Amino acid sequence: MSLSADLPRIPGVVSLPLRGLPLAPLSLALSALTRRLSANHPGLFRRLGVHGRKRFLVDPIDLPLTLLLDLSDPKPRVTAHRTPPSADCRIAGPLSALLGMVHGTLDGDALFFSRDLVLEGDTAAALALRNAIDDAELDLAREVTELAGALGRPLTRLLPVLESLTHLPLRRVDGEPV
Amino acid sequence: MELVCPAGTPASLRAAVKAGAHAVYCGFADETNARNFPGLNFSREELTEAIAFAHARGAKVLVAINTFPKAGGQDLWHRAVADAERAGADAVILADIGLLAHAARHHPTLRLHLSVQAAAANPDAIGLYVREFGVKRVVLPRVLTVAEIAALNRAVDVETEVFVFGGLCVMAEGRCSLSSYATGRSPNTTGVCSPAEDVVYGTEGGQQTARLGGFLIQRSTPDAPAPYPTLCKGCFSVTDENGEDKRGHVFEDPASLDAAALLPDLAAAGVTALKIEGRQRSRSYVEAVVRSFRAAVDALEAGRPIPEGTLARFAEGGERTTGAYAKPWR
């Protein structure tokens, strides 16, 4: 249960249709994004250290799916699941909290204090992933639009609309990486 | 007054500098610093680049090498001091008396700060560090009142630095063995309190639980704020002196230090530098807390009122305290 009232949640009208979403294409797209991040941000995976071959379950609790980040294979991949698979650790919270941590707008410890973020399993692995992502200064919107090729430009134009509708932190707001 | 800010990663260091830090403190990714957590800290190359970044923007970088070397294993700590100097650090923050002696002898031009981990809290102890090792600044333990800090500053001839925001320990730093008792590791030796490897969160009977080294240390309803999984913040059942059973935070309540309102008093007490705790926190925390305290320091120097802070959301347990600075029970 969350103590914060100000974290946006995905409304049911959006999450319900996602129950019918085919997961295989989503997994392919997310794996492609992960490999792009791996190539563009090698420091992120280096910073994981001894946890660099583990399986991380990311659980956006306001979506009807979970995401498995599997680093046990040299080619990292992300797969979407209706039923949570086994993993070394589980990191759960509203999608806005998870994206806020990725984009540097929210603090993981503060989310933990307020119970908006829940950790289970290998705590050290979860902590390493959180710290590595924080240091990487990722901008998922930019990575996705660049990955999308010709579709990138319309996606970029769509971004402010999506942000306005969902109130999700979809991109970095603190400028370009230095 | 100088604002000394935390950085657990290069990204946090850049955030601190951009937010107005006068100095940033950080450590190497090993047992030589007291925030040796997974995924944190700096390689030698990262430190060199970070120092160049900070210096180009007028900020200093202080390297914390503030754990206590193990017998026979001092080389790791000696290398850390040498590498910090080589990278261009403005000072190293040390706690161990042997390491201070080594640094003073082999790195005579390197500025030495005494870590809070040394727990030097009186003029005689501080005088010894200044006289024997040439320490230029002492980070005071978080057990002193403002009045005691003022008296101490009148009696010593060295800069003093005090904590103004962040996590609190229950006792004098460097002397706590609670983490060692539960896990065999502590911030004093391996640089980590309540190692994440020994922490297990779970749900039992509808309640959130936290175990440290196999010990159940917290059990609460899901709507209660969560503290750090340390023994000092744990909830325990005890029998008091009247034979009554009590349950709660026996050592200390989860709360974060926030001394923003006391900045004028600390300045009047002769404090040189203000320290923000939190190298384990995100760049979001660093940016917000540094920006807030830089505004407070600037207001103080301009003779304006200290602005109202908006940092409650970062506090452990959602609670803030002025800690030992004001001890109303005395």
Image (cartoon, rainbow, N blue to C red):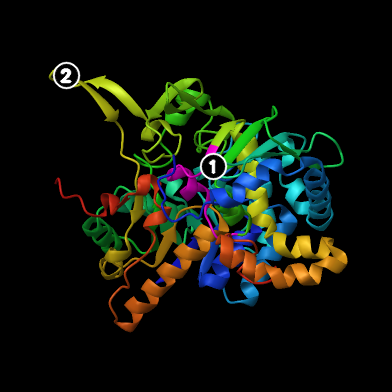
**Secondary element at tag 2:** loop
Query: According to the image, label 2 marks what residue?
Result: B244
Q: How many marks?
A: 2
Residue B61 pos. (x, y %): 58, 64
Residue B304 visible from this viewpoint: yes
Q: Residue A60 sits in which quadrant?
A: top right
Corner quadrant of residue A105: bottom right
Q: Nearer the viewer, residue B252 or B49?
A: B252
Q: Residue at x 31, y 53 (%)?
A: B123
Point out residue B36 in the picture as x, y percentages from the top left corner. Answer: 59, 42
Q: Residue at x 60, y 65 (%)?
A: A163
* Drawn side of residue A91 relative to residue B228, left or right: right
Q: Calculate the distance from the C-alpha at mark 1 to the C-alpha at mark 2.
A: 40 Å
Please tell me how crowded label 2 is: few (under 14), some (14-19), or many (20+) other residues with Cα within 10 Å. Answer: few
Magenta-colored span: A104-118
Quadrant into which the N terminus of chain B falls:
bottom left
Residue lying at 67% horizontally and 68% vertically, measured from the top left: A159
Q: Which mark is residue B67?
A: 1
Between A157 and A73, the one nearer to me in the picture: A157
Residue type at tag 2: Glu
**Is B138 in the magenta?**
no
Q: Amino acid at mark 1?
A: Thr
Label 1 or label 2, whichever comes before in sequence order:
1
Q: Residue furthest top?
A: B243
